[in-house]
Image: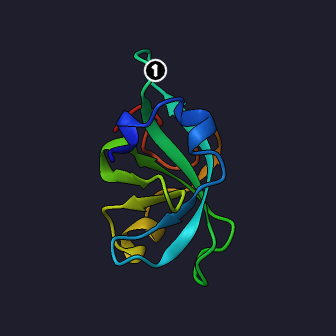
Amino acid sequence: MSVAAVPNPQQTLAAATVRDISGKVVGQVQNVDIAPSGQAQAVQVVLNTPATPGKKVVLPARQLSYDRGAKTVVAQLTRSEIEALPSTQEKGSPAGPTAHGRY
């Protein structure tokens, strides 16, 4: 199921495991940005990869699917692509040149 189609996304996705496109665990959901429609717009993830432990990144909902049974978010990106994303300092506060609202 698409992350954008998840009902009550802030509660449903809270603390879900995040995997890359190959199924490897890359982190955990920290926050969910909600569009005015109530759908998930983006997911903030805390990475736990060896190269980037503790780094926070924002993944657009359109690049994510959700496995309800496993409570897992799956990104349509590789681990390297996820690790290369700009770091966010906190929800809504990007550290790099990419604006938080640009998905």
For residue 93, say whether it is visible: no
**Which residue reaches farthest top?**
36
Spot occupied by residue 25 in the image (x, y as percentages of width and height): 52, 74
Spot occupied by residue 86 in the image (x, y as percentages of width and height): 48, 56
Residue at the spot x=63%, y=36% of the render?
A: 11
**Which residue reaches farthest bottom?**
50
Task: From the viewer's side, name the closer residue of 79 and 71.
Answer: 71
Is residue 65 toward the left or the right of residue 99 in the image?
left
User: Dot 1 corresponds to which residue?
Assistant: 38
The answer to whether 72 is drawn above or below residue 14 in the figure is below
Quadrant (top left/top right/bottom left/bottom right) for the C terminus: top left
For residue 24, say whether it is visible: yes
The answer to whether 30 is drawn above or below residue 10 in the figure is below
Question: Which amino acid type is shown beneath numbered disc 1?
Answer: Gly
Residue 84 lies in quadrant: bottom left
Label 1: which secondary element: loop
Spot occupied by residue 26 in the image (x, y as percentages of width and height): 53, 71
Residue at the spot x=63%, y=73% of the render?
A: 48
Task: From the viewer's side, name the closer residue of 2 and 99.
Answer: 2
Residue at the spot x=46%, y=79% of the render?
A: 24
Is residue 17 toward the left or the right of residue 62 in the image?
right
Residue 2 lies in quadrant: top left
Task: From the viewer's side, name the closer residue of 84 and 96.
Answer: 84
Marks counted in the figure total 1
Spot occupied by residue 14 in the image (x, y as percentages of width and height): 64, 45
**Which residue reaches farthest front?**
69
Applied colour scheme? rainbow
Residue 20 lies in quadrant: bottom left
Pointer 1 local density, CA inside 10 Å: few below 14, some 14–19, many at least 20: some
